[in-house]
Amino acid sequence: MAEHGSPGRLSRLVDTAPLLIFALLLAYIAFEAHNFFSLLSFKLILNQSLPVVIICMGLAFVVMAGGDDVVSGGIDLSIPATAVLCAGIIAQWLATNGSLPVAVALAAGAALLVGAINALLVTRIGMTPLLTTLSMFVAVVGVNNVVTSSRRINVSDPVILWLRDGQIAGVPVGIPIVALIALSFYHLAHRTRIGLNMQAVGGSRDAAETSGLDVKKLQSASFILAATTGFIASFFVLARGSGSSPGVENNLMLEMVLATFLGAAFSGRRVVTLWGAVLGAVLVAAISIGFKSMGVNVFWTGLIKGSLILAVVAFGALAQRGRR
Amino acid sequence: MTFKSSILGLAVVALSTMTAQADEGLSLEGKRIGVAVVGTQHFWDREAFNGATSTVEKLGGEVVPVDGGRDNQVHADNHDVLLTSGVDAVISILGDGAVEPKFEALKSAGIPVFTVDHPSPHAVNNTTSDNYYMGTTIGRYMADAIGGEGKVAVFNAFENALRICGIRTGLWKYVLQDYPGIEIIQPELAEEFANAPEDARKQTLDLLSQYPEGTIDAIHVGCWDQPAIGVVQALEETGRTDIIVTALDGGPDTLEIMAEDGSPFVANVAQQPNLIGSTAAMNVARHFAGETLLPQTYVDVVPVNGAEEAKAAYSSLGYGSLE
């Protein structure tokens, strides 16, 4: 057929289009924005992307174990709400003169509960992850509103302030900490049996079942892991905001979904991967900081960002269709 | 009313003339001024932002605008972007406690911070409405509207989070101390910062089902008036427009509601957000011209008591005509 006449060049172009769009855009921003290509701005991009990087890895685990079909596959939209709930619990506990260790234990308990309920609803009751975790998002935000009375709570605990202001050799402490977390998650996903089995389940559920893997258990583990990333991210949410502010979950949710699926466009097989998610989160932060430092009209940035994501994801879909 | 509205008109004209006069000799030529606003969805935020950016441009400066999208966290983070991009000064509009460490960082990097509606020890100057007058005036108007006694529900999410709200709601409560017949329903309600009208509508419907007819006399929004839009909707949906509504800010959207026949929304205090933003920008220029600024610059407010005054304020503040 005519359209398959020169598949090589066309499909290669479609394949590299997202990368090209981003490279061109970054080059343009670097040219236009003040101080964009500087160490200071690089540190800022990494630092601002930390909470999103962490929850993106959680989402990546769920997608890896559940398959990458957005409707029927694995997805966990409740992670940002879990992060905000944990932050709310810690802030509220500290505000009533409680100690940090107890606050942390309470938050961890809450996160595990959210993960366990998600796992139960999806693997035992058989609900679709998309609807389950979206409802969970709403419910968890509701719980957080009860915990914090929908009010802002300032936090001045030294550990949280250290996460906010601390530096190691001029690098904000959050960056190496999250890098270590990312490395251990990478190890978990690619170097341990449970991680590899999880990926096997996501790759082909039937094949995994036939080969005797406990599919439900592995998918449940991915939801627990996702909730754990929400718990970890809550410390960075608190540090970033010097406390807990209501409403933070919405932007986190948007950025998490964008970054994770944008990240898929950078993987060879167009699938959600840990590194893709991390890279996606950093790129979303870079582009949005770039636009801001360029002084782009604030009334336009939403449209520009949205179109960009659509373009990249559309090229991703095209490339995948070409392969099938 | 015509007399009052012409006085108001004169006052506004006088203020703008003063601004124009002060304008002479001031310049921001060659300066890059960061303008950080918490959101642009609401009239107040958008107008303060427009006032600041247009004045910076008028004075020859370059604007680096950043918008928090009505998310206090994003708003705070945006200050880091301004710090990195090396602006000469920052005008920061609203924001909660999350911005304080950012102001501190800007200050220690030698970038002066000028706030709007956010008093801060790290800012050179804060331009704001006379919040003390707003709080006491709305307290008196509300007390009068319910005959000095009754039960009042209050939306009060920000009294402890934002200083301006602490002043406004605190002084509203201070006035009510002299009305022992007025009882504030506990617990107080907490409105959302984003999606405030819809959230307040739902919360009001819940409240009304808890308090049957005749058991609640007023609903007050302690620090702004976007939630009041939803409150009025809920009262109209349930036919409970005997309950009066009071709030603060008085943008065109809420003045329009107040001006409707038989509106339950009876009192407000209107601010001049555009002039506030513009004054903050002038203060930046004054600072660079070597003037010493007072910690706070107050911009006049317009008390609005009843539908007729709402119409008068609407036209005197330049929003058009509601006649």
Image (cartoon, rainbow, N blue to C red):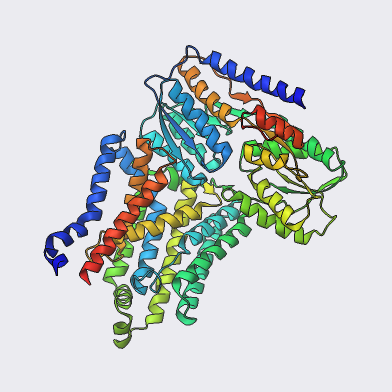
Q: Is residue B282 above or below residue B21?
A: below
The residue sitting at 49% across, 66% down in the picture is A134
In the image, A42: left or right of A104? left
> Looking at the image, which residue is at 53% across and 61% down?
A107
- Answer with the quarter of the image where residue B81 lies: top left
For residue A11, what is the image quadrant?
bottom left
Outermost residue, front side: B323
Which quarter of the rendering shows the C terminus of chain B? top right
Left or right: residue B190 versus residue A5 is right
In the drawing, does residue A31 fall left or right of residue B60? Answer: left
Asked whether residue B231 is in view, the answer is: yes
The image shows residue B186 at horizontal and vertical percentages of: 76, 53
Measured along the vertical axis of the image, is residue B23 above or below residue B100? above
Between residue A231 and residue A9, name the one nearer to us.
Answer: A9
Residue B201 drawn at (x, y percent): 67, 54
Expressed as whole percent of the image width and height from the top left, the position of residue A224 reads: 44, 70
Image label count:
0
Q: Nearer the viewer, residue B287 or A189?
A: B287
Residue A159 shows in this picture? no
What residue is drawn where x is 60% and y is 57%? A145
Quarter of the image with the N terminus of chain B in it: top right
Residue shown at 28% from the left, 37% from the top? A38
Give the answer, above or below, for where B120 lies relative to A43. Answer: above
Position of B79 with respect to A64 (left or right) is right
Question: Closer to the camera, A277 or B103?
Answer: A277
Depth check: give the residue in front, A299 or B156. Answer: A299
The picture places residue A276, in percent across and down from the top left corner, at 29, 59
